Amino acid sequence: MARAGAKRSVEPSGNAGSAATRAALVAAAADALREVGFAGASAREIARRAGCQQSLVFYHFGSVAKLHLAALDQVSGARNTRYRAMVEESQSIGDLVRAARAVFDEDLDQGHVTVLVEMIAAAQFTPELRPEVAARIRPWRAFAADSVREALAGSPAARLMPPEELAHAIVALYLGLEMLAGLEEEREPALALFDRAGKIASLLDIFRRKRKT
């Protein structure tokens, strides 16, 4: 991403320079959301980080809000790939919980979920953002429901915990833990909760193995 030096001017849409500028703006917007929050991620700040003129934010995206959403889409796409790989590699409920703990740590270290948290907070007082952000959370709930359904298959818990309801709780809990960990600058309580969930998962795995024998 460009930082200093001559700033880019408007390029004809569709050429390599235009694509590079769009990519730089999206990356800069994601960085700004992580580091200075929604309130600080202005067109000026994003353009400064991207090393281009502020007018290019509006030339390429029409509004700062649409650029923020493009940044959210980029981060969500990358994390979706990571989470799906995590689920595919897990062989048990215990594996899934341990992987989720590792990914939670990773998300905190790299600020991935911060982008979504900032956009959710912004949507509370920006009505036009509300349906856009909500639409981007729905696929995460669907993914969580599919993962839960597969993980609990053959377990007595499958009848007690409907996957859709549990998925909603998981997404809400994950985001809430992320927000509290950032606010308090302390992740140990959240990690302890994952460890507790891991012990429960181990019991569920035992039940699953007994049912198969």
Image (spheres, helix red, strand yellow):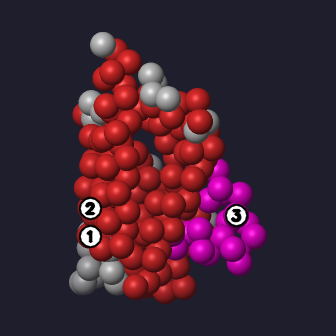
Circle number at residue 130: 3
Pinpoint residue 24: horizontal percent, then vertical percent: 35, 65
**Amino acid at pointer 3:** Arg
At label 1, which amino acid type do we have?
Asp
Question: Compared with residue 74, is residue 48 higher up or lower down, i.e. above or below?
Answer: below
The residue that disc 1 covers is 109
Let me know if residue 29 appears in the view.
Answer: no
Along the viewing direction, whichever of 73 and 183 lies nearer the viewer: 183
Q: Is residue 127 covered in magenta?
A: yes
Q: Secondary structure at mark 2?
A: helix
**Residue that badge 2 annotates:** 106
Asked whether 69 or 211 is in front, the reply is 211
> Along the polypeptide, which appears first: circle 1 or circle 3?
1
In the foreground, 96 or 66: 96
Label 3's element? helix
Q: Secondary structure at mark 1?
A: helix
- Packing grade of label 3 (10 A; few <14, some 14-19, many >=20) is some
Give the residue displayed 40% in from the left and 85% down from the top: 184
Q: CB atoms at circles 2 and 1 under 8 Å apart? A: yes
Please name the residue shown 26% across and 79% down the image: 3
Answer few, some or many: residues within 10 Å of disc 1's Cα (few below 14, many 20 plus, some between 14 and 19): few
Asked where in the image residue 154 lies, by quadrant, the reply is top left
> Residue 198's spot in the image, x, y percent?
32, 50
Residue 30 in the image, given as x and y percentages of width and height: 40, 68
Graded by Cα atoms within 10 Å as few (under 14), some (14 to 19) or many (20 or more), the crowding at tag 2 reads few
Disc 1 vs disc 3: which is toward the camera?
A: 1
Q: Which residues are magenta?
A: 116-135
Looking at the image, is 198 positioned above or below residue 110? above
